[in-house]
Amino acid sequence: MNPKRFEDGLAVRRQVLGDEYVNKALADVDDFSRPLQELVTEYCWGEIWTRPGLERKTRSLINLAMLTALNRPHEVRIHLRGALRNGCTKEEVMEVLLQTAIYCGVPAAIDSFRIAREVFQEAEKNR
Amino acid sequence: MNPKRFEDGLAVRRQVLGDEYVNKALADVDDFSRPLQELVTEYCWGEIWTRPGLERKTRSLINLAMLTALNRPHEVRIHLRGALRNGCTKEEVMEVLLQTAIYCGVPAAIDSFRIAREVFQEAEKNR
Amino acid sequence: MNPKRFEDGLAVRRQVLGDEYVNKALADVDDFSRPLQELVTEYCWGEIWTRPGLERKTRSLINLAMLTALNRPHEVRIHLRGALRNGCTKEEVMEVLLQTAIYCGVPAAIDSFRIAREVFQEAEKNR
Amino acid sequence: MNPKRFEDGLAVRRQVLGDEYVNKALADVDDFSRPLQELVTEYCWGEIWTRPGLERKTRSLINLAMLTALNRPHEVRIHLRGALRNGCTKEEVMEVLLQTAIYCGVPAAIDSFRIAREVFQEAEKNR
Amino acid sequence: MNPKRFEDGLAVRRQVLGDEYVNKALADVDDFSRPLQELVTEYCWGEIWTRPGLERKTRSLINLAMLTALNRPHEVRIHLRGALRNGCTKEEVMEVLLQTAIYCGVPAAIDSFRIAREVFQEAEKNR
Amino acid sequence: MNPKRFEDGLAVRRQVLGDEYVNKALADVDDFSRPLQELVTEYCWGEIWTRPGLERKTRSLINLAMLTALNRPHEVRIHLRGALRNGCTKEEVMEVLLQTAIYCGVPAAIDSFRIAREVFQEAEKNR
């Protein structure tokens, strides 16, 4: 592990996914899941999300499209929350998901819209 | 067919993919491919790409990520050219493709990087 | 939106997916989901499902195969119900799903068989 | 190997894919590819394609949809030729591929339309 | 059906997936699911898993990787239990899943790690 | 970049993929592809392939299965060559690919068998 990159990654991860989520992920870590947690924090967050070449907001929108294409609903949910935290508007999320209907097919878009509605309702409750 | 939306879609399609590509696509149309050409022009371009809610540049970046995830190299190539036409920089394309390495896996990113290098070389020749 | 095509699409959608499902989908619509609902109704149902070139029954069987390949269980369930409404027999559904075992792999077929059994049990209860 | 089912499978495979293709496949067989050839002939053709529950024509249409979803262009091409041999019309193939645009996304449909045009041109030449 | 191969397949299936699981699968069989159960037992288990060319342990590890790539969580769970029964260690499973993070992308690995933790907890309880 | 891990990764990458391939990849590097090359060498090779928990031979077999599932023919080819370099036999490769026929579907297995035959013929020529 590269401690500097891990720390940088952890900081971005906290900013995007929220302390609550990250604290829970860290508290749950055991010997089995530690190598994955470290890999994800260091590479995904420390190596890619820290790069200055794209706004975080744009990275969030790209992720919503990719995760819809990849059919990974758990991650769609987490990154929808992250998108809100990164300043994406409901309208921008809607635009991205409409675009997935064309390129990934209608069923993919329907699945992500369903999750998005739940995330927006939850966010409105917590305001 | 909705002629107004078809025309609007065709105009955006020409702006994004270029007259040369679109003229060729239209010239090639026969009874077999006409319904698809109309569907794509009207819905994909006339319905989605004309929407004001996201910049075209952002739509291009999202498409590069999605098409990489979907493993559709022909479309990756066409939309790389479209991304340049929409004002995306080489650096932004690189950032999107690096992000696909993490979420879609390394082989997906390698395949799109290979196509992107060819498109950039071709674009530099044509300048 | 093209109102004529939306209405035509809505009529077919009701015939295939049932009034109960469609009424619920419409009642749930809000500003976030309206554009997708309109796109799906107009494009998917009004543009494709209204085409006379294939029997609806055949379109249902094709959808079951595609949705199994695409790994979209929510839509598999909805279109299984639609297949029954379109006159597909249990035997025809079984044949399609057996064919998916060969082409999409055994895990894909097992997942769709599981959903199909539930849908058939539900349909037998409601008779 | 079950010789009876292998022979039954081989007969259907010849009827659907043509003697020329199957003779070439058999002539190419070596120790490395024999187990796959036997598995495919027996399992795919002898076990599934021989089943009476669906018309061969319907099985072909289902395959075109599934193979488009699965993104396997070599097999799309082979099964397009098989679809013609099984009596599917150009119009029916077009309908199936239009339906894939909605459910699998536009890039998937475009890729299969491109292959289909080539197969139809080749078929028209050989008439 | 080839009764000899079915019996051989059933024996391996019991050894890998356990009597409890297989008894339940057999007890649940009805006319709708019987052809799939027979196909899976005979081909998947009787034809492939009985082959001597790879250790069962290696087949289990390969399956965990493939099923993660294919995004089939029900089967990931079943084959995680099978992997333990085939003598794979927790460490080996972890290594395979870390490798999926690179090739299938981080979201795929996270989904399978989550299931794996549950299966290991369940296995530790039952010891 | 972590230079130590990059160097370790580069050494394993050379052992698995061969000096010729890696020299060519490094010679081709430009500003656009450098970040991906570094990420892949460090993350994929330095972080995962250097781990002692699985034999390299097993990692190769797992990769062939995953890359077949992921439908990435360029990488299937490269990792087939790597598998031979890691000591996998032709028979072991055949077993893995037969297993993909069941889990990923027959078209996936056919595509990888075709590439494997070419790689084996090339390897036999070069002996």
Image: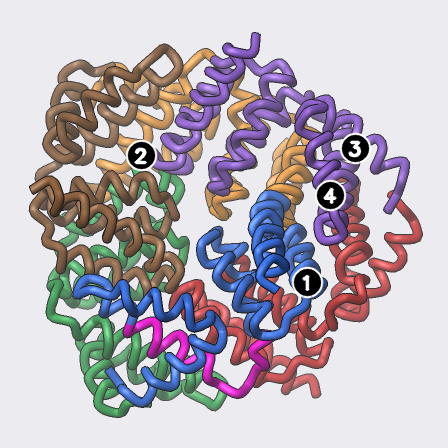
Chain colours: A red, B blue, C green, D brown, E orange, F purple
Q: Which residue is mark 2?
A: E26
| Residue B55 position within the rendered picture, expressed as x and y whole percent measured from the top left | 59, 81
Is the residue at mark 2 from the same chain as the one at mark 3?
Answer: no
In the rendered image of this protein, does residue A54 appear above or below residue F58? below
Report crowding for label 4: few under 14, some 14 to 19, many 20 or more residues within 10 A (C-alpha): some
| Residue F71 position within the rendered picture, expressed as x and y whole percent measured from the top left | 47, 41
Distance from disc 4 to disc 2, alpha carbons, whole Å, reads: 57 Å
- Tell me, yes or no, whether the two marked residues, 1 and 2, touch with CB atoms within 8 Å: no
Nearer the observer, disc 2 or disc 3? 3
Report crowding for label 3: few under 14, some 14 to 19, many 20 or more residues within 10 A (C-alpha): many
Give the main secondary structure of the magenta stretch. helix
Q: Which residues are magenta?
A: B38-58
Kind of residue sitting beneath label 4: Val
- Left or right for E98, reference F77: right
Report crowding for label 1: few under 14, some 14 to 19, many 20 or more residues within 10 A (C-alpha): some
- Work out whether mark 4 precedes mark 3 in sequence or the reverse, and give the earlier one: 3
As for residue C11 lying within the magenta part, the answer is no
Kind of residue sitting beneath label 2: Leu
Of residue D25 and residue E111, the one placed in the foreground of this image is D25
- Tell me, yes or no, whether the two marked residues, 4 and 2, touch with CB atoms within 8 Å: no
Nearer the observer, disc 4 or disc 2? 4
Distance from disc 4 to disc 1, alpha carbons, whole Å, reads: 15 Å
Q: Which residue is mark 1?
A: B90
Q: Which residue is mark 3?
A: F9
- Left or right for E64, reference C62: right
The answer for which chain carries disc 3 is F
Q: Which residue is mark 4?
A: F29
Kind of residue sitting beneath label 1: Lys
Is the residue at mark 4 from the same chain as the one at mark 1?
Answer: no
